[in-house]
Amino acid sequence: MTERLEVIIANRLDEIPRLAEAIEAYCETANVSLKAIYNLNLALDELITNLVSYGYDDGGRHDIVVRVNVTDDRLTAEMIDDGKPFDPLQDAPNPPLDASLDERPIGGLGLYFVRTLMDDVRYSREDSRNRLVLTKRLKD
Amino acid sequence: MSIDVTYRERQPGLFELTLAGRLDTDTYAQVEATLDGIFANAVRGIQFDMRDLTYLSSMGLRVLIKTMKRLRPVRGTVTLTHLQPQIHKVIEIASVLPKENIFSSVEEADAYFDAMQSKVLGQDG
């Protein structure tokens, strides 16, 4: 089985493409389908965009650690950050998908994507850090 | 990783915007700037050609939602053509656009635009 991938990025939006490229290269070596790679990269993009935009108060540089692992039947990503405590499962309501266009808020879709595109999302707060584990099943 | 945006007015008031690459946090401002330029004209419809769009995130979707809101006062139409499967899935999950606005060919999208415009003109007359 392929070794685990670890990427450390800074809390900047322009780091997201670098992470996506690393995950794509890693997953392709491990023969993960393009669809699963797309879903994972989109979920991480949404989480990191949210974290960088709202997760820090000090304006300083912070590391975000992402580890990706492929086993026979699942693709797993772990994301660890030292931002404010934030549980995307509890702290973000689902957007009003059936609302009319005029009532539709411009934001709120990103974390909904994370919950929809991943098969499992687990949150914990450990040692003053947020830890998220995202899982995508590779076989039905 | 970036986006190429080009546009042309295919018939009076109907602008076709071709997106190639990624529409996301990094690139949405570029597309919005292009749309700002388009909206300096009398716009009745925006047709997004997405055949070479490989990635769409929620920040990218905001561009589509905003465009629909901008066209609302003139009862204009947003149509999408040639969506790659992963893009289609994201738009479906977000329930941003009704299925009626998504087309596999430009001809179908044009026919829809024409039908919607006749309806608007009919109501005005």
Image (tube, grey):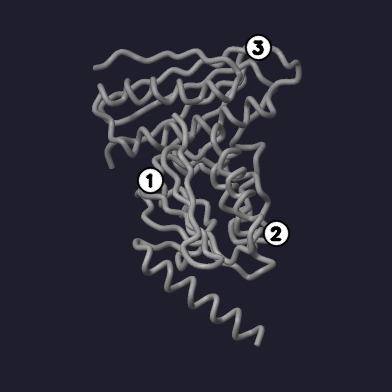
**Which residue occupies the foreground of this view, A117 or A91?**
A117
- The residue tagged with tag 1: helix, strand or loop? helix
Q: Are marks 3 and 1 on the same chain?
A: no
Within 10 Å of the Cα at label 1, are there few (<14), some (14-19), or many (20+) other Cα atoms?
some
Real-space Cα distance between discs 2 and 3?
36 Å
**Which residue occupies the foreground of this view, A72 or B56?**
B56
Q: Chain of mark 3?
A: A
Q: Are marks 2 and 3 in contact (CB under 8 Å)?
A: no
Q: Are marks 1 and 2 in contact (CB under 8 Å)?
A: no
Question: Is residue A97 rendered to the left or right of residue B48?
Answer: right
Q: Quick check: can you spot residue A16?
A: yes
Disc 3: which residue? A61
Q: In which image quadrant can residue B108 be found?
A: bottom left
Q: Is residue A52 above or below residue B8?
A: above
Q: Residue at x 45, y 58 (%)?
A: B80
| Residue type highlighted by circle 2 | Glu
Q: Residue at x 60, y 63 (%)?
A: B43
Disc 2: which residue? A103
Q: Residue furthest right?
A: A57
Q: Are marks 2 and 3 on the same chain?
A: yes
Q: Where is residue B115 drawn, in percent x and y?
A: 49, 78
Q: Where is residue B46 drawn, in percent x and y?
A: 53, 59
- The residue tagged with tag 2: helix, strand or loop? helix
Q: Chain of mark 1?
A: B
